[in-house]
Image (cartoon, grey):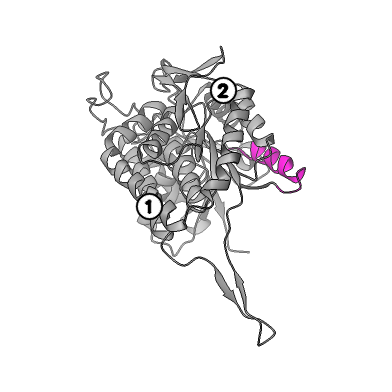
Amino acid sequence: MIGQNYINGEFVSSASNFTFDNIDPCTEESLGSFAIATTQEVDEAYDVARKTFHSWREVSRVERGEYLYEVAKLIEERREQLARAISMETGKNYNESIAEVNEALHMAQYAFSSARTPQGEAIASEIALKDAYMLRKPKGVVAIISPWNFPLAIGAFWCLAPTIVEGNTAILKPSEDAPYSSQLAVEIYHDAGIPPGVINLVHGDGTVGDYLARKDVDHICFTGSAEVGQHIRHVCADSWHKTCSCEMGSKSAVIVFEDANFDLAVSSAVASAFKLSGQRCVSSGRLIVQRSIYDKFCEDFTHYAKQITAGPPFLDDSPLTQAQPNSNAYMGPLINTQQLNRVLGFNDIVMKDNEAEVLIEPKYTPPGYFVSPLVYKTEWRDAPYLTNEVFGPHVSLIPFDDIS
């Protein structure tokens, strides 16, 4: 697997001598080499996107939508390839990867259909003889900096598909932890006939993303950590015109009242906490349960959490197109060594804290970045693992008395 940038309608090798490996989080082995885009190549992608914007915005909205119809058909044809690629580079189990491909497909279908529906809004006027209306117009060049955990759905479709249908041009910088899925997505846009320059792809690490964000783009779509998102907001604030939409981390909670459907609450909490190994911005790292049902909830949640199995998404080392999905793996590994160390660090704090009652002790089983669930009971207090996002299979069970 060799990673290439996509600039002005062509896949091109980078002039950079610097590369990064796309690491399989299940084996810690390289899946392929991706060149880090140089500043000159980011400049070229920006210049092409800026120049193309002036012609692309003149294409009718309906015609722009027709390209997305072709994109949707290609996603359906390549569903299996896309899902397997997602699982291979993220460790996500195969069923979750298929679900992500379906989400990408639905966005492509939505973008196509929205091109044929009225856009705008009539606004009531204070003056009877005056008509007022709001009409959407494309903004310009959009930089999309996408995450690894939904590499196909978020950057390449949730962000990119509406961007181009509305008449903007785009530069996509995927996460260095999952670049291949984005490259496959760009191949689909290319094969669907999207004109050169409308979509551009640059690979690289955070340095490339930062350089792209500081270019004179008109909008930045970012999904990732709160720290990087806050940095991007500052970059935009220093500009006269640049705007951003940042979807960042959280410390999400499931709150369970005593009148809830108990069995549904338990099963939903398990799925929310441990799907994708807790590496979603909406993963429930905190389960806040009314005290009257707290002990029973802890018992049942722990019972099911102990049955969770971790493993690779495929059963053997056959070629990607032939490997058998591992139906026994409920969750996979953490994504990289940085995230592994973060989770292990928070786990260690809990294990040493006498105020936390550990119900399930975690285990780290290399090779790969596999960490089993940590589940513990605690009263609410200002502890680092209760206030900071862990982004892993790390769950606190916290009681409360009433809504006040």
Question: Is residue 237 highlighted in magenta?
Answer: yes
Q: Quadrant of the C terminus?
A: bottom right
Question: Is residue 49 highlighted in magenta?
Answer: no
Q: Is residue 160 above or below residue 94?
A: below
Q: Amino acid at mark 1?
A: Glu
- The residue shown at (58%, 27%) is 342
Bin the neighbour count of mark 2 within 10 Å (Cα to Cα): few under 14, some 14-19, many 20 and up. many
Of 146 and 60, which appears nearest the observer?
60
Residue 183 horizontal/vertical position (percent)? 43, 30
Q: Quadrant of the N terminus?
A: top left
Residue beneath disc 2: 37
Element assignment for label 1: helix
Q: Is residue 91 above or below residue 13?
A: below
Q: Is residue 358 above or below residue 108?
A: above
Left or right, 281 with reference to 194: right
Magenta stretch?
221-241
Residue 35 horizontal/vertical position (percent)? 51, 18
Q: Amino acid at mark 2?
A: Ala
- The residue shown at (58%, 65%) is 135
Residue beneath disc 1: 66
Q: Is residue 267 visible?
A: no
Residue 129 horizontal/vertical position (percent)? 66, 86
Element assignment for label 2: loop
Of 180 and 15, which appears nearest the observer?
15
Of 166 and 307, which appears nearest the observer?
166
Quarter-of-image position of residue 208 = top right
Bin the neighbour count of mark 1 within 10 Å (Cα to Cα): few under 14, some 14-19, many 20 and up. some
